[in-house]
Image (tube, grey):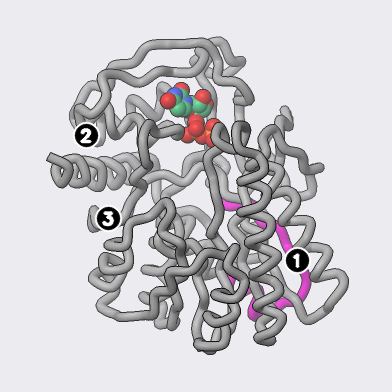
Amino acid sequence: MSILVTGGAGYIGSHVCVELLAAGEDIVLLDNFSNAERTVADRISELSGRTFPVCDVDLLDREGLGRVFAGHDIESVIHLAGRKAVGESVSLPVLYYHNNITGTLHLCQAMAEAGCHSMVFSSSATVYGANPIVPFREDFALSATSPYGMTKVVIERILTDLAAAEPDWRFCLLRYFNPIGAHPSGLLGERPDGVPNNLLPYIAQVAAGQRTHLTVFGDDYPTRDGTGVRDYLHVVDLALGHLKALAYVRAHAGAEAVNLGTGTGYSVLEIVAAFERASGLKIPYIVAPRRAGDIAVMSADPAKAERLLGWKALRGLDDMCADAWRFASRAAEELN
Ligand code: UDP
């Protein structure tokens, strides 16, 4: 029996696949390759020394999805496929709602038809909206500041309703904080299309000489140095959290939301300094006004993850930056 990983060629999905294979699980990688390169599947094979089926299927293709379940013996699903750019979701809300929500509904229908009822879902700390009280706890009220965020709120609600209606279903809703870093091999990492929205890929491109400077969005927040604070965690730690969540859904019915973060926040300038240490390079930056929709501090209360899943982030900021830089410098060399 196999684990279906939707979005398995993406930044987080690829790391999840590597860890599943290393743990001896069989996988089926599904991706529409809209925001991932096909070579990622080869790299996962190279790193794990194993082969696995790759399905080039869009979750909006309900029949295609049915064929995936008919053709493979799927035991559980780790569902990461979805559009994820906050700014783009503000300009293209219908695309985001349709893709993320309809895609998930199709997946639930196909799972039900196949008698598969357990799923680990890729949610996000964005479901806490503009909550000013930190750290964020799973029992806080949910809201969203963008259509992207609202797709996560709505999907969490759909899956929770489904688990309440039909006791066979089992879900773990993982609320990611800020995953950064890359596989230590330098073979897998985050390779954004166009201008990066997120801090780490942007800094990495400045370090690689692809951009002249970083723009720091606001230095007048009520934080240690005035810049925004986030709970960054290593993508390999995040991936390992999915394996713990899989073990949990195998053993428990219902729907549980769980934060995946470290509980420690770092400011933008602290991240710049850590990246400079890891790369030995200077990261020039300018300060600009705050970015619309940003809040001062986001950090996780990680207690539930440890209690329920037995998961804790182990990798520190220096490893996150060193691994991010190893991948980004390699990717920049490949471009030249
Ligand atoms: N940030 C920044 N410049 C950038 C991108 C991000 O100063 O080019 C800041 C942003 O304001 C926030 C932090 O870095 O305080 C993390 O932003 P990111 O977009 O990576 O994550 P999110 O805001 O979704 O938590």
Q: Which residues are magenta?
A: 246-260
Residue designated by label 3 = 184
Q: Residue at point 36% right, 80% down?
A: 52
Residue 222 occupies which quadrant of the picture? top right
Residue 151's x, y, as percent? 68, 48
N-term mark: 1 or 3: 3
Q: How many marks?
A: 3
Judging depth in this view, the residue of 89 and 274 nearest the camera is 89
Mark 2 crowd level (few <14, some 14–19, many ≥20, 10 Å Cα): some
Judging depth in this view, the residue of 187 and 197 nearest the camera is 197
Q: Which quarter of the rendering shows the C terminus?
A: top left
Judging depth in this view, the residue of 261 and 3 nearest the camera is 3
Residue designated by label 2 = 279
Nearest-to-viewer mark from 1 and 3: 1
Callout 1 amino acid = Ala
Specify whether 144 is left or right of 266.
right
Residue 329 occupies which quadrant of the picture? top left
Residue 331 occupies which quadrant of the picture? top left
State the CA–CA distance, disc 2 to disc 1.
Answer: 42 Å
Specify whether 311 is left or right of 128.
left
Callout 2 amino acid = Ser
Tell me if residue 251 is in the magenta stretch.
yes
Residue 132's x, y, as percent? 72, 28
